[in-house]
Image: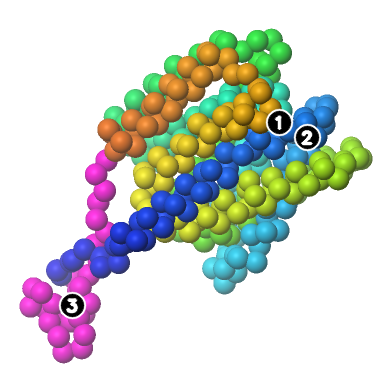
């Protein structure tokens, strides 16, 4: 059977639209530190401020996305359980890390999840770790050591929690890769809902009284920083290959500490910047210099009734 390249490759306009949507999503994701380091939320002292913010941020984002789920395609599989658990862990660990250390350290360590996903993919799914993955893993290891070694006693807990958030992020990517046949909006809703509901029994007994400004910032975190970017990203990746989308998302860890510094004057240690640069360098090389050439999607030629394919085969002929 003769095969031809699929005719539905994105046009130039669609590529531009996809890039703008993914860039907008990454830009909005990068504001997490801007909100979390704001004086009203920074005033939430105690060990439970991270879980509290993570809980309500996820529930608000889930409520925003629920009407957009294609419920006819939704189904439950046992593999969804580890996905929801790792996402829940990632959610609370990242927020907690952001409250205990600098925004730069938290977001750079979070992005090591892309490297962990490649390593776990070889161990769990039997995927091949290519040269780009090895380079990214090596750079990430150097960056992690640099950041951890530079952490003072007051920030070591936040640094280690940030490292754990990156590992759990890698688990989420691995789970999503395994469940790639499922509806993406359904998976996102499950992750957001589970991560909020798991924390709810822990958060409600705290009886913490939040001010109006604190509630407003948490709502903005759920809507502006988490919910809407997911919608934009989902729309953008329809027209982009995963490598390009991942590369565009790297503006998030670059801009996140920049917003915090501009708005709240949080100083970033040079060692953290150096470690973060190593991590970003490895990821950048992975998606540029060591990017694997895309394999075109090929579909069988479908001729109209009575017409012949380019190879002279009758329409509908198959191997």
Residue found at the very far bottom of the displayed protein:
306
Q: Are marks 2 and 1 in contact (CB under 8 Å)?
A: yes
Q: Is residue 238 above or below residue 71?
A: above
Residue 10, position as x, y percentages in the image: 32, 61
Mark 1 or 3: in front is 1
Between residues 121 and 288, which one lies in front from this camera angle?
Answer: 288
| Residue to which mark 3 is pinned | 317
Q: Residue at x 25, y 65 (%)?
A: 6
Q: CA distance from mark 1 to mark 3?
A: 62 Å
Q: Is residue 117 magenta?
A: no
Residue 60, position as x, y percentages in the image: 72, 53
Between residues 126 and 283, which one lies in front from this camera angle?
Answer: 283
The circle on residue 37 is 1
Q: Is residue 81 left or right of residue 12?
A: right
The quadrant of the rendering that contains the C terminus is bottom left
The circle on residue 274 is none
Q: Residue at x 47, y 37 (%)?
A: 251
Marked residue nearer the N-terminal end (3 or 2): 2
Between residues 20 and 51, which one lies in front from this camera angle?
Answer: 20
The kind of secondary structure element at disc 3 is loop
- Secondary structure predominantly adopted by residues drawn in magenta: loop
Q: CA distance from mark 2 to mark 1?
A: 7 Å
Q: Is residue 217 above or below residue 283?
A: below
**What's the magenta region?**
292-319
The quadrant of the rendering that contains the N terminus is bottom left
């Amino acid at each position: 059977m003769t095969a031809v390249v699929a005719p539905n490759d994105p046009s130039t306009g669609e590529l531009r639209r996809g890039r703008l949507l993914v860039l907008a999503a990454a830009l909005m994701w990068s504001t997490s530190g801007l909100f979390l380091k704001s004086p009203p939320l920074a005033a939430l002292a105690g060990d439970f401020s991270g879980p509290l913010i993570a809980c309500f941020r996820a529930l608000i984002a889930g409520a925003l996305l629920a009407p957009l789920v294609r419920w006819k395609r939704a189904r439950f599989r046992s593999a969804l359980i580890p996905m929801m658990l790792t996402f829940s862990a990632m959610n609370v660990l990242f927020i907690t890390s952001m409250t205990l250390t600098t925004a730069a350290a938290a977001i750079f360590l979070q992005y090591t999840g892309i490297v962990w996903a490649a390593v776990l993919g070889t161990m769990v799914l039997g995927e091949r770790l290519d040269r780009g993955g090895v380079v990214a893993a090596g750079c990430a290891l150097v960056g992690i050591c640099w950041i951890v070694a530079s952490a003072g006693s007051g920030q070591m807990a936040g640094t280690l929690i940030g490292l754990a958030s990156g590992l759990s992020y890698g688990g989420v990517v691995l789970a999503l890769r395994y469940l790639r046949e499922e509806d993406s909006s359904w998976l996102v809703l499950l992750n957001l809902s589970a991560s909020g509901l798991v924390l709810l029994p822990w958060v409600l007994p705290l009886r913490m009284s939040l001010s109006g400004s604190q509630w407003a910032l948490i709502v903005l975190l759920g809507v502006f920083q988490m919910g809407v970017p997911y919608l934009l990203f989902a729309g953008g990746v329809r027209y982009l290959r995963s490598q390009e989308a991942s590369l565009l998302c790297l503006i998030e860890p670059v801009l996140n500490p920049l917003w915090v510094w501009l708005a709240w004057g949080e100083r970033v240690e040079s060692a953290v910047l150096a470690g973060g640069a190593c991590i970003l360098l490895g990821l950048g090389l992975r998606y540029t210099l060591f990017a694997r050439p895309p394999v075109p999607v090929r579909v069988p030629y479908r001729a109209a009734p009575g017409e012949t394919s380019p190879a002279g085969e009758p329409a509908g002929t198959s191997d």
